Image (cartoon, rainbow, N blue to C red):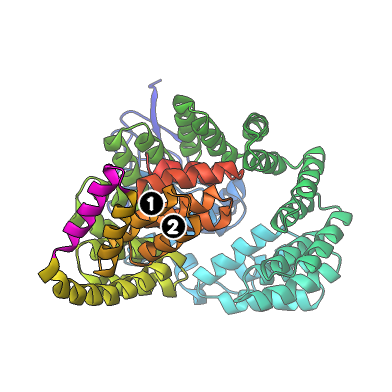
Amino acid sequence: MEKPTGYCRFCDVESHHGETNCGECGATLDPEGRVRSVHDTTDDVLRVLRELAASPEVRNRLTGDVAGSALQIGVVQGDISVAGPDTHLARQVLDMLLAGAAAPPPSLASPASEPAGEEGGEVARLRRALEAGEDTESLRERVELLRDLGRSEEALQVCRTAAEAGNTQAMLVLAGMAADDSQAERWYRRAAEAGDASAMRQLGRLVEKAGRFQEAERWYRRSLNAGDTTALSSLGWLAQRVGDVRKAEEWFRQGVEAGDTTALGSLGWLAKDAGRLEEAERWYRQAAEAGDATATWQLGQVAEKAGRFQEAERWYRRSLNAGDTTALSRLGQLARRVGDVRKAEEWFRQGVEAGDTTALGSLGWLAKDAGRLEEAERWYRQAAEAGHTTATWQLGQLAEDAGRLEEAGRWYRQGAEAGHTTARWSLDSLADKVIHRQKAEQRHHENIKTGTLLELRHRGGSAEDAGRFQEAEQWYRRAVEAGDTKALLSLGRLVEKAGRLQEAERWYRQGAEAGDPHALWSLGSLLERVGRLQEAERWYRQAAEAGDTTAGKSLGDLLERVGRFQEAEQWRRQFE
């Protein structure tokens, strides 16, 4: 017997060298035993779909209905195999096949071709599934299939009728497919009041989202009392959200004891956020061993923070192999951290190809850092079009640095209107800068006769270097009065050395308002020195976002000082 060389992507049956058709479904195979490109085999694919829809034996062997059968279909498009038990993917497969077919199969293409009331009709199957108490996710898949067949109103009407008759599963389906939160809340509330524990928890999440925390806690507790132990994690995250970390940990520990493996990762998150990295790693390892894919990249982060970069890469790759495409960006950030910019760019490009739009901004950052400003602008524009407001701010920075102030203002305004606080600050700063520049130019021309601004500041610097501090202060003050905004920083530093901290703060603030990023950092440093940490953080952040490397590192140190380790690491990573 010849050795199998592949599988038919329609029915997952082994094929053998030399076969031209699958022995199970008859689909055309290439010499390697795989189905040829979908563009070459549309007729074969449609024939298989017809058989799956029409043959009770084949249907029963798979999942029992056309939707389930579609889940078993694999399609090869070019060199990329697309297959698996995913309803959304199955619908994409069907849409693609039917869109390219000259004559779609009657069983799938036309609503009129399927008798709604006869045995085997999809609407009838939905009705029977509701009566049999099928799980909510399967019911939702059935409704989605009917939507794809153009029969969404019939499907929803069946669910409404069942819901009005007291069927809680139908209520959950209607809530999950509601057009807005108010409709969803109405159906969840009805199912919850009818005693459905899952609906109680879902209602809790909905009211928590609306900020009604006390009501959310009541519903989570009712869900827990009704036997839904996953509500323990919901109570944990609610406690964490309102700032009760101790109570959150108690809830998560109860969740672990009740067998909720997702609570393992939650305990890891709490431990990591508190800086207890060894404990965090223990929880994440348990979560990963229990099959939690999220825990694998969390382990990568813990290892990366501890400087175990090779181990971090292994965890990130494991997360990627488990289907988490966001791991591509994490691998890119790791490569950039260890100095391998070329590899970082490769990872980010793969992330873009996989649909991770955050990687667009990362590519923009790499290009900007390498001085490739036109390329950076292209990446940032794509990121902005994908909805990333930080990219609009970055575009404003590029335009401002190039002297295109009107364009910079447009980008900053777009970011500010989308809620980006730094873009709002940059917009205000730009407006002040334009006004200040106009006034400075006027003062500059007035002072040309008595000496240049640069000369005044340089005289101050020479006097300061020689230890003649009073004379230096006089020159710096003259430079400031003549409109030299950079002299504000020099004057602030001089009086800070003399211990006149309030006066130094005043000069730094003026320099910061004039757009000097070094003055932003100096102001933050002074405020940190006197213990005003929240204000210091704000000024460090503004300077760092304006590209000041020293400010970025200072911000990371300050955040670590107050126990915000994860955020501190993110800022340090940006400026390494």
- Regarding residue 27, the answer to whether it shows in the image is no
Residue at 46% across, 38% down = 320
Asked whether residue 285 is drawn in magenta, I would say no
View extreme (top): residue = 1
Asked whether residue 462 is drawn in magenta, I would say yes
- Give neighbour class at mark 2: few <14, some 14-19, many 20+ (Cα, 10 Å): many
What is the secondary structure assignment of the residue under circle 1?
helix
Q: Dot 1 corresponds to which residue?
A: 493
Q: Quadrant of the N terminus?
A: top left
- 187 up-or-down from 216: above or below: below
Where does residue 219 sit, x and y in percent of width and height? 82, 64
- Regarding residue 190, the answer to whether it shows in the image is yes
Where does residue 445 sit, x and y in percent of width and height? 14, 74
Where does residue 175 sit, x and y in percent of width and height? 68, 71
What is the secondary structure assignment of the residue under circle 2?
helix
Where does residue 487 sit, x and y in percent of width and height? 29, 59
Q: Amino acid at mark 1?
A: Arg
Residue nearer the viewer, 406 or 340: 406
Dominant secondary structure (helix, strand or loop) of the stretch shown in magenta: helix
Q: Dot 2 corresponds to which residue?
A: 504
View extreme (left): residue = 449
Residue at 56% across, 51% down = 530
Q: Quadrant of residue 126?
A: bottom right
Q: Amino acid at mark 2?
A: Ala
Residue at 39% across, 56% down = 492
Image-based side of 356 in relation to 215, left or right: left
The magenta segment is 451-468
- 552 up-or-down from 542: above or below: above
Image-based side of 169 in relation to 82, left or right: right
Q: Quadrant of the C terminus?
A: top left
